[in-house]
Amino acid sequence: MNDNSFLNKLSKTIITNYSENYSDLVVILPNRRAKVFLIDELKKQIISTIFSPEIISIEDFVQDIAGIRSVDSVELLFEFYSVYLSVTEKDKESFETFANWAKTLLQDFNEIDRYLLEPDRILKYLENIKEIEHWSVDINKRTDLIEKHLAFWKKLPLYYHSLYNYLLNKGIGYQGLIYREAVNNLNHFSESAKEKKFLFAGFNALNQAEEKIIQHLLAIDLAKIYWDIEETFLNDTFNDAGLFQRRFKESWPHYKTNPYEWISNDFKQEKNIQVIGTPKSIGQAKIVGQIIEKHSNLNQSKLQNVAVVLGEESLLIPVLYSLPANVDALNITMGYSSKNNPAQILIAKLFKAHTNAISRNSTSYVFYYKDVLDILMHPLIEPYIKANQLVNRINQNNYTFILHKRILELQENQNELFQLLFKKWDTSSVSILENISAILLQIKSNLSLDKDPEVSGEKITNAFVYSIFKVINKMISYFSSNENIDNVDTLYAIYKQVIDVAEVSFEGEPLNGLQIMGVLESRVLDFETVIITSVNEGKFPAGKSMNSFIPYDVKKEYGLPTFKEKDAIYTYHFYHLLQRAKNVYLLYNTESEGIDAGEKSRFITQLEVEKQPNHHLTFQIYNANVPEIAYQKIIVPKSESVIERLKNIASDKGFSPSSLTNYIRNPIQFYFQRILRISETDEVEENIAVNTLGTIIHGALEELYKPFIGKILIENDIKICIKNIDDEVLKQFKLVYKEGEIKKGRNLLAFEVAKRNVLNFLKLELESIQNGDEIQIIALEARLEREIIHPRLPFPVKIGGNVDRIENRNGKIRIIDYKTGKVDKLNVTLKSWNGLTEDIKNDKIIQILAYAFMYEPDAKGLDIEAGIISFKNLKSGFLPFNFKVDKETIEVISAEIMESYLEEIVILLNEILNVDVAFEEKV
């Protein structure tokens, strides 16, 4: 804190004026956070040991006067629903429907009470407004919908009084109720506290109840109040930072005879104010990290005098990720919505998984694989559950839908957390919530085992988990004593409504390290360096959004705060943050369009227009560094180890035809797959991929023809194959697609397509035999290899690969490569050898000639033809490689063709093996 801070001045005043009896002094501050800082200031200035004065927030002080316990928004919502059910005779709404309007209505009740308005009068006013809105509809012609709508507004006073009395009888209440009761109990309280002295400090905007309490205590000389207002703002009627203070100074009777304290002149002192614009919220988070890094490098201990004030709570997580590594301590004090809480996201995934499992099958509990993987891979689960083996099994075996029993079988070593996650949910809402509560406790237990909580972020994660744990336990408490929900969907809908009003509370060490806070949490505090984010219209200030049933003109009439007053509150907080700071960074989003967009805040314009002589105001726009080249292609030089790996490939299994075409397509892809041996990760193939379908057809044809290898095919052989198609294709599906679903949807269609492709091929084969072709199968899925020794190669190189089918047809060797994709004659026609291995469109020719080259020594002098059978172009039959020379088409692969092919392949291999030719990505 600054040496000239408000709390420093307050502590000196306490020591000077109240040192005779600190224990009779009660200091009331705007929030609980300021208490720790005030005690710290007192410790610095008091040498001897004393009993500290009682330091309390205004909310706690008012609770003491009223003698009523405050309930949080979640508990209040449940209590209100109980009241609603008790006073509503017919057409009772479900909790999830009720919560939609109850949250807004509770806010209005709260405002009515905090400003001590007559509830019947203002709620009757709302009813009359709604009546007027429907004045044109004849009373006898009103629809049920209109009648229900008007009946709702008529019941508002009943809802208010029933809830008020119900809570009062239980000794609990929302803030407004407590404030109203405190005012009612004020005379009794002041009688019992005659020996006390009350010191109010650092306030700005007060509601009617707070004004009445403070003025009452001032009038009977039990209290003193110290404001924190700049003379500039107090006297400037156009500056809303002094709006409330001007009202109090003019209207409070106390100030007819007493001075208005304290009025300061700190804002005019020297300040460096940097206004920084950058696109999007993430840009702001990154700049916050850079500013913090600069200050931490200068002096790590001074970070405790640096405050990051988030104009938008959603920036918290990006800012935390952007902080430099040398920030060894930080304190977060702000309200953070539970919607984006990691623990809440996990609970949402659990609800989705179990709801789907229950609804998918009336007799079985069947999980969808994505739901399972979402849970297993969640950051709060994955480190502690050791389910890598289960994830791999799901991916490798294509489990799309998994029986509950099967999940338990697949995970061998089940810890308690795993069993809780996949425990069957019954229809009892309490047992489901108890299961979730147990999961959260187990996560909490796992987090506490982390060896280095500061580094692991255990404290922040614990806050997230604990906030959801509290919500779940409140729901358990409610459903234990109220009618149970017997539907998981309904329970989840209620959970979503409740989580909307819940907030995450962070705990930290306020006096140590970097301070991260929301706007309201900055009250009373002063920092040397202040970084404020989201200084945009609609964010800071918040804008005109009014979540209320009470219209603007009614609020204006009855003295309730409107957006005008809320803007004034933001204005005060903004200028107070700057008041005693020396270094100020104001960050705003420069994007004017899109979801995250907004104009630069008027506060920045005001600073510019009303610039003080000692203020050094600078403006900067930061944009992400855009590289001159949109994408830098990957280039990998060939090191000794790479050459060694190439030698191993060349001498072991060799280069396959597909790896050679892969190199032509993209050398970097070849490098990843063959040199680094990086294979694609296993993923569940929900719908059968084209390559999987190809594997199934290949496998089915191999198995159908296996019994006939070496013999000349006859019609009956093909008829036997046709008879076995269904069984063999099904067998291949189960072998290749494993546990994947093939009985419905797209996969059933793919199954039928595979059978049809095999049948059509066999019909083509049968037709050839009937036309007199003599077919003898020599090999199926045969492994072929051949070594190339050539003067232009640095060492012998082996070519190797599996060929789909080799046959002797009418005295010629025919090498067949099956393709499930479409291939036509042009794809296997070559007009010139020049550039054969430079163009990927020649990939089919390179592959089938490679098979011919490898089989050539075994052909025993017979003519060879090599080609493709395309299942998407079966009507074209066998598509042989053909070489066009001077209008002549050559289909037989002669020695000359083999020699020309070999020369081209040697050029390609030489490039692959050349140490001076790097692997360069093709883009």
Image (cartoon, rainbow, N blue to C red):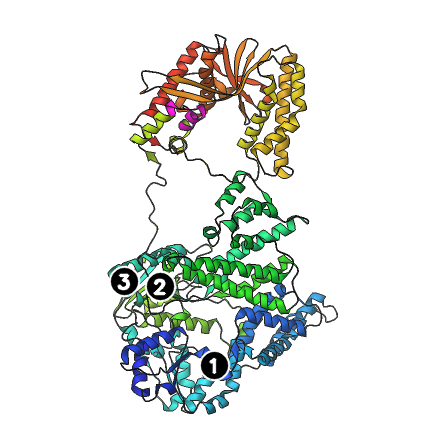
The circle drawn on residue 330 is 2
Magenta span main SS: helix
Q: Label 1: how many residues lie within 10 Å, few (<14), some (14-19) or many (20+)?
A: many
Tell me the SS state at disc 3.
helix
In-image side of 137 versus 453 (left or right): right
- Write down the residue under mark 1: 62
In-image side of 123 versus 299 (left or right): right
- Write down the residue under mark 3: 300
- In the rendered image, the vertical position of residue 832 relative to residue 623, given as above or below: above
Question: Which portion, as a residue range, is magenta?
Answer: 649-663
Give the residue drawn at x 30%, y 75%: 5
Quadrant where the C terminus sits is top left
Q: Label 2: how many residues lie within 10 Å, few (<14), some (14-19) or many (20+)?
A: some
Calculate the distance from the C-alpha at mark 3 to the C-alpha at mark 2.
12 Å
Look at the image and say whether residue 574 sits in the magenta stretch.
no
Quadrant where the N terminus sits is bottom left
In-image side of 200 versus 291 (left or right): right
Is tag 3's residue or tag 2's residue first in the polypeptide sequence? 3
Calculate the distance from the C-alpha at mark 3 to the C-alpha at mark 1.
40 Å
User: Which three-letter amino acid code belongs to the residue tagged 1?
Assistant: Val
Residue 93, quarter of the rendered image: bottom right
Is tag 3's residue or tag 1's residue first in the polypeptide sequence? 1
User: Which three-letter amino acid code belongs to the residue tagged 2?
Assistant: Leu
- In the rendered image, the vertical position of residue 211 relative to residue 580, given as above or below: below
